[in-house]
Amino acid sequence: MNNIKNAHHFKSGLIANNCNNYKRQITYTDYITYLLGKNQLNQPKAKQSISDKDQFQEIKWQTIQAQEDNKFHAKELATGCIYLAYHSDQEQNAILNVSGHRMLYLNGVPHNGDMYTYGWMYLPVKLKKGINELFILGSTSDITATLLFPFSHAMMSLKDTTFPHVIFGEPHKILTGGLIVINSSDQPLTELSLVSRIAGKERTTKVPAIPPLTFRKVAMEFDTSGMVQRGVHKMELQLLESGNITDQNAGEILVVEPNECHSNTFISEIDNSVQYYSIVPQSVSGPEPPALILALHGREVFSLNLAHAHRPKNWGLIAIPTNRRPRGFTWEDWGRLDAMEVLNMVKEKFKVDHSRVYLTGHSMGGRGTWYLGATYPGTWAAIAPCAGYATTTLRGTEKEEPIRKSTNIEQLMRRAGNASNVLELMNNYKASGVFILHGDDDEIIPVDYSRRMKKLLAPFHHDLSYQEHRGGSHWYGNESVDSESIFDYFKPRSIPVSKQLNHIDFSTANPAISSTMHWLSIVQQKYPLKFSRIKADRDLEKKNIEIYTEDVLVCNLSLADFNIADTITITIDDCLNLYQVKDPEERIYFYKNNEKWTLGPDLNPELKGPHRYGTFKEAFKNRMVFVYGTSGTEEENNWNYNKARYDAETWYYRANGAVEMLSDKQFKASVYAHRGVVLYGNNSNNSAWEELLADCPIKVQTGLINIGETTYTGDDHGIYFVWPRADSPTALVAVISGSGMQGMRAAESCQYFHHQAQFPDFMVFNLDFLVNGLRGVKLAGFFGNDWSLENGELVENDQFTYSDEWV
């Protein structure tokens, strides 16, 4: 980084072992965080023992010294905590750079970690006069920690840019990139602008407001009209405040040939951030629209690197989305949204043949291929997972979870993640061809995972091909993803025309994620997020449709393949209905009531449906904004802001994201219409509550949480829930709140940005889950299809009824 006048490298500290266990689940165990939340963590001292809980082994502080490269290394880091202290002669602001951890607390304030040791998490922080305490948690590697003291309060970082390529010979235009702007001051920066100069052309971009002591990856524009030579071009960058230079640096932009692999940027509808995808162009253009292959990268593989592993095809192009990061979300959650956003964008931009769309991926991308292939049947002519695994984790090939006893609340909480369980969606694979490729000597993802899928698919799948590469390891060269056998399998296959699709067998666990297969949709479920299935047979000549359902309350179907004025006989679960076709574009709805199916009107958008269904995490899209409360006590206001900032840091790190942070007083629903909102605080300290949640049956204020007839008093309960915006047919509000400071501290701890951590519509908890896991969850549930509690499902944690297996 430029603009740094001096640095302090931490070289000594204390380490405590056996104090945490971070897993990819809703809660993790961390005794240090538990004590911080309880305000019971004193300044550590060497040889001091602090543990008194049966859940943990003895926790004792020991001295630790950094090595010559300023790295702290110890085997205890995997489940330990490092304590570091810095004495400041004055109150001052600085930039904290720590690497190799999941999160940290500086003077009790949470900040996101750099678990993959990328090295580019620069956190603006406030140091108090005297001792400043750092608790660094959940190490995945060696730890380094440095305080940087800048010359300027407004800076750029080019360590993590998102820049596109320029295509030589294409019409000159304005392109968009993304880079980090840091505000290390105590005031919002509202008069910033970025100036780019490249090949003699200058472009100025207004920077959105950067709140105090935060950073944001901002969109910036540059003018390509002067770039008339291939190769690397230097781009000069200046950050201005009110016209005065506060920082300057230089980046690079690459000009490539049209037939070379390249990356394009776009503004994502998820959060208005700059994202990119890579393209392997079609080698030879012809009169026919090209086919499209969507390729999914593996863990720690950049999309452009995967592009370079593919040879161009003369019959189609290859598009590679990013999953939002090289690790991202294993192609679930926002990784799934990114993949489908890129798919739709590329379809339109390159005018591809919509009947020839294919899906493939390697390793984690192989898992993504199994997942997206089952989640969006009818979208792909064929899929080809390479060295993949269909289970949600790499723990076993037989079942998603081992059979064991579980409480009602565990069952409900885990049901929120049913959409990830593709083994329960196996019938969806019948909609496309399946080609499985795996090296038989794979030491990373054993070939047994693919053999298991072959065994499960073979009895019913009639277009299944399986190939093992003899002696093949996890990666045995580009052939691991670019095998001719895959593309020879793809090329002749296409999605049948609609009139040929007369049999449908479709399952989903969440209509908000996946609701439609060709002409038939599951709109509402009877039991939220259990597995719903619908089977249909259609005879266009006889003008009849027979449908059978499981856990479906509302379905709809298109009659576009019939003729206007045709009278169609529609039988659903033995209930007979007649309908005369009026409009080939219409979709007709059927509703189940008292075991009978009857024709009804279009779904009321105020009800749950594919447009918005929950769960809690579904609010984190639709160009979401974070709204923090400023109407409470100083302590409450600080927590609201710090938690919103912590989530913004986490979102940036995990999702290459950029989210707008607003105070409750800045937020106006009309200005942010149809956008997702994440609200921090409760009705006592966030004035946006009444505007967004006036009709919500969940009430949270200082000292009280009320959910229907259930009330929790005191200051020690946290809560997450989701609620539809009354002024939008699609947007949701996610609430991160508590009944007091201890409850709000509990709300810091859930891992909702982990793809394997799934949440119901609402849950109440306290700090106990940091030592007791899900036993610390007091209540959880789903709203009904009318967004009521009365017609929903609610489980309290005193109901210790056990089941023999997971639901």
Image (cartoon, helix red, strand yellow):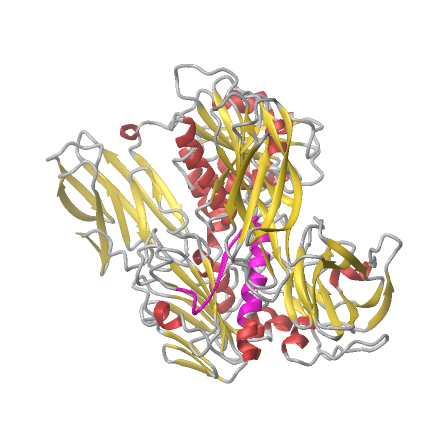
Q: Which residue is nearer to you in this view: 251 or 551?
A: 251
The x and y percentages for residue 693 are: 36, 70
Q: Which residue is nearer to you in this view: 790 or 468?
A: 790
Judge from the rendering whether residue 807 lies leftward or rightward of residue 474; answer left or right.
left
Q: Is residue 440 above or below residue 34?
A: above
Q: Which residue is nearer to you in this view: 487 or 243?
A: 243
> Is residue 274 something one can see in this rendering?
no
Quadrant in which residue 477 is drawn: top right
Q: Is residue 409 above or below residue 455?
A: below
* Residue, far left: 565
Judge from the rendering whether residue 132 lies leftward or rightward of residue 775; answer left or right.
right
* Residue, far front: 243
**Count of numbered circles on the image:** 0
Judge from the rendering whether residue 73 lies leftward or rightward of residue 561; answer left or right.
right
Quadrant in which residue 539 is drawn: top left
Q: Which residues are magenta?
A: 640-667
Judge from the rendering whether residue 674 lies leftward or rightward of residue 125; answer left or right.
left
Question: Which residue does the image show at 43% across and 47% down from the upper left?
Answer: 269
The x and y percentages for residue 170 are: 49, 23
> Is residue 685 something one can see in this rendering?
yes
Question: Which residue does the image show at 57% across and 63% down from the upper left?
Answer: 645
The x and y percentages for residue 257 are: 57, 21
Q: Is residue 123 magenta?
A: no
The x and y percentages for residue 531 are: 41, 52
Question: Which residue does the image show at 20% across and 41% down from the upper left?
Answer: 586
